[in-house]
Image: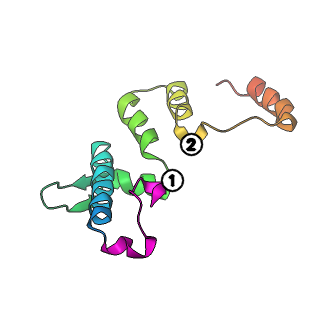
Amino acid sequence: PSVYGVPGGDESALDLDPRLLQHRLNLAHSAAVLLDRHGLVSYDRATGALQTTALGRVAAHFYVTHPSIAIYNEHMRPAMTEIGIFRLFALSHEFRNVVVRDEEREELIRLREAVPV
């Protein structure tokens, strides 16, 4: 419970706790609103109906996070150069922790010289 910010209590009694139920509903609602904002799902706030979109299915299939989709939605244009597309994808959160290993440096230098991008 503490991982999700739920106030203390006996873990065995959490399913009976109305505070936990409301907390879980709030978490689900917040996630649905966020995914809807980025076009990954269609969320009807009145009924709670949740439907995935084509973009959401593609993002899920390729493990693309919603922050990356938000970047694509903001910066993607109908006409972009190849370098512009590479730069856009380089902004993806999935590449945030990619590091170059020492043993890869020479190969990457050769690749950089051979590839015009």
Residue 99 position (above or below residue 18): above
Regarding mark 1 in the picture, which secondary structure is present there? loop
Residue 83 position (above or below residue 71): above
Residue at position x 47%, y 56% in the image = 2
Residue closer to the observer: 69 or 78: 69
Residue at position x 47%, y 47% in the image = 65
Residue at position x 17%, y 54% in the image = 45
Residue 31 is a magenta residue: no
Instruction: Point out which mark residue 63 bears.
Output: 1
Q: How is the image coloured?
A: rainbow
Image-based side of 85 in relation to 41, left or right: right
Instruction: Point out which mark residue 53 bears.
Output: none
Image-based side of 110 in relation to 75, left or right: right
Q: CA distance from mark 1 to mark 2?
A: 9 Å
What percent of the width, then of the height, locates residue 101? 81, 37
Image-based side of 108 in relation to 59, left or right: right
Instruction: Point out which mark residue 94 bears.
Output: 2
Residue lying at the far front in this picture: please name it: 9
